[in-house]
Image (cartoon, rainbow, N blue to C red):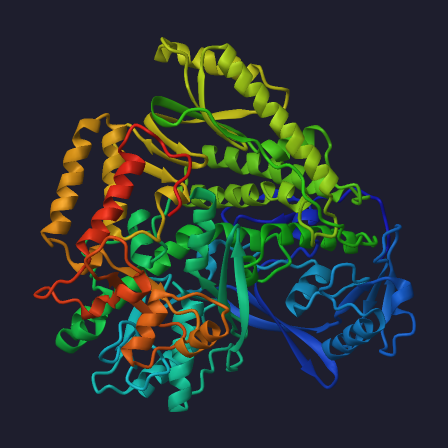
Amino acid sequence: MKASMRQCESVTALSTGSGADFIFSPILFGHKNENGLVAVEMVEKNGKSEVVLFYRQDGLTVEKKEDFQPFIIVNSDVISGCEIEFQHRTLAGNEILNLCAIFRSWEDCSKAVKWLTQKTGLSSSSPGAPYLFLNDPVHQHLILSGRTMFRGLQFDDLKRMQVDIECLTSPGYEFCNAQREGDRIIAIAVGDNTGWSEVISDTSNDEKTILGRFVDIVLAKDPDVLEGHNIFNFDLPYIFERARRHGVRMTLGRDKSIPKKRPSRFSVAERTITYDRCDVYGRHIIDTLFLVHSYDVSHRELDGFGLKEVARHFGLARRDRTYIDGSRITEEYLSNPDKVMAYVLDDIDETGKLSALLSKSNFIQTQMLPYSYQNVGVRGNATKIDALMIREYLRQGYSVPLPGDSRQYEGGYTDIFIQGVVKNVHHCDIRSLYPSLMLIRKLGPDKDSLGVFLQLLDMLRTFRLQAKKKMQETISSKEKVHLDALQAAFKILINSFYGYLGFSQGHFCDFDVAEKVTANGRDLLRTMIKWLCENKAEPVEIDTDGIYFVPPEGVKSSELDEFRLKFSQSLPEGIEIEFDGEYCAMYSYKMKNYVLLTADGEMIIKGAALKSRGLEPFQRNFMRESIRLKLEQRDDELPKLKKKFEEAIRGKKWPVSMFAKTENLQDSPVTYSSKRGEGKRSRSAVYELALRSGRDYRAGDQLSYYVTGEKKSVAVNANAKLAAEWRPDKRDENIAYYLAKLDTLYEKFCTDTIQAEFDL
């Protein structure tokens, strides 16, 4: 591996698959110029390691094998004296990790890691460890080989199979649990992107036959990808547990191996989901629930993450879609099994459509990144940038720095200028504010001696503009969809470069430069606010790179373009703004919490305080209706709205579902009791209900409950009751309690005073 300061040469590295080819550099797409790779697996044989490469050729899947030599990037002095035999490549430059140690097998590499851990007293994941071990062999192979998956393929070239199950629930329980004998699988629906689908069921109640048929179908159809909504935490664990009971071997791998499972975590922004990771040999697993969370973090517009809610939000649900409340699956199956079969078929139809809508960006990123498709979907964006940096440094034979020490620094500029309802609100967005500032002012990491960081950023921006231009020029709808996914993938990575600077685990992170970027951004935004005020416009809210404002009073539509042009011309060269929204009204509640009313009457709700999933359904409904009245300047109807809700509560006109909260048991009730006894947690209504029920509730079970009693101030944990025990002929919901909740909402949203805080 020869060290060099050369710029990265360009090669034709990626085809869109439909004639619109781009010229790409290996710095972004890897230096191995080959197409059709759909999966990589490592196998060990006779003390050596191999990689099995799966390629798509003329619609068929073929296998090839190569020797695999895993590596550790390490300080040369630290590895001196290692007892495990290795070859080495000296890396140029002055950084700590200046040697690439290459081993005969994964087993030898793992032994060397243990030796380094003992010698240094630091594990491979410890901050400051003088060695870097990437514990994913596929990731290692892709980095050193320069390969990336899916090159030369389009999204539709993948063989994608959707999976969804339906189960019976034992009497007395609200949600099925695979560990209960009676909670068996009654149907497994499978389908793929060719339009084929099948419901595997057995009216003789033979669960073992259902499971065996599922294995046979997967092996026969040979999909590249298995997709499901909450497939990691529900469908697959349930299938595996029931298969274990019946002695059915889940030989789902391309080599007929059984999937491997281990605990893992998926993190996106402030959200973290623990899940049972499942790896199927030669295949990828995509959980559309994770895709939905990633989407919502950037858009903040979803009211819930369930498949039916999300499908309706995106307009994916068919008009004749079959709906069954989850708590009624068992009842429906016993009386009308055909309806349940139609229901589960609709589930996989929506799963496939949802994945096609939200997966394309990850598909494109897989063509760039040294990760499997499954891992692209669960890796953080800053980690992806780090992988690109390391891959290029190894390609050029240069040493890699250790991650820097993290520290706090001031972030972006956010502010709110007006609270309440504001009419005629416009929005402008600074296109890629931080990336633009980094490129214009050459703000890259100090440790990046090759300048790879800014090269990558510049390429991504150039290619995104190129993709958007081609998207406008092409007349092919299929090509437009692909190019839109391409530019969206570029945008996601572009917007991750600033975050990488402040990513403490990044080998090229630079907190000083990150601070400079945010300082530059704050200065620019304050200048923009000043210009708006000086030109008689009225700012409403600003959030890092976007401004909501009211244009100057009296400005006509014909004069608006001139106002926008002057605003744009006031900005420094290289900074561009996009005027991307006009709204009839805006309800500005508090920072990052607001509602927009479009010209066609749609409400766009942003912020956790205005769409908390911890509210009872009747509260969410009241908030929506009251805010709409305010936006439409119908405040005089607010008392009437409140009276309507009061009458419904007092008159007991609503079913219990309007009051019920639903929660999952994260621990078993036994574990909860133990923690309570040790003083490690407070009382919880849902756990107290589980304990009082006398039923065998377990971790993962779901319970819905409502509050009983007669006083508005009651201890919820002592007055909660399972929703399943509610009786319409003997209603006992706490009228005073729920009326008090309505009063609180009315005071928060329907009076003239806007509260500074609203803790839900």
Vertical comparison of 344 with 592: above or below: below
Image coordinates of residue 23 in percent, x first then y, are 64, 42
Name the one closer to the observer, 528 or 66. 528
Residue 503 lies left or right of residue 161; in this view the side is right
Vertical comparison of 402 with 594: above or below: below
| Quarter of the image where one finds residue 216 | bottom left
Vertical comparison of 205 with 195: above or below: below
The quadrant of the rendering that contains the N terminus is bottom right
Residue at position x 80%, y 45% in the image: 447
Q: Is residue 48 visible?
A: yes
Residue at position x 50%, y 63% in the image: 58
Name the one closer to the observer, 85 or 237. 237
Name the one closer to the observer, 176 or 630. 630
Q: How many marks?
A: 0
Image coordinates of residue 696 in percent, x first then y, are 33, 81
| Quarter of the image where one finds residue 726 | bottom left
| Quarter of the image where one finds residue 195 | bottom left
Residue at position x 24%, y 61% in the image: 706
Name the one closer to the observer, 275 or 236. 275
Vertical comparison of 421 with 263: above or below: above
Residue at position x 62%, y 34% in the image: 434
Image coordinates of residue 297 in percent, x first then y, are 47, 47
Residue 29 lies left or right of residue 270; in this view the side is right
Image coordinates of residue 90 in percent, x first then y, are 88, 60
Q: Is residue 600 visible?
A: no
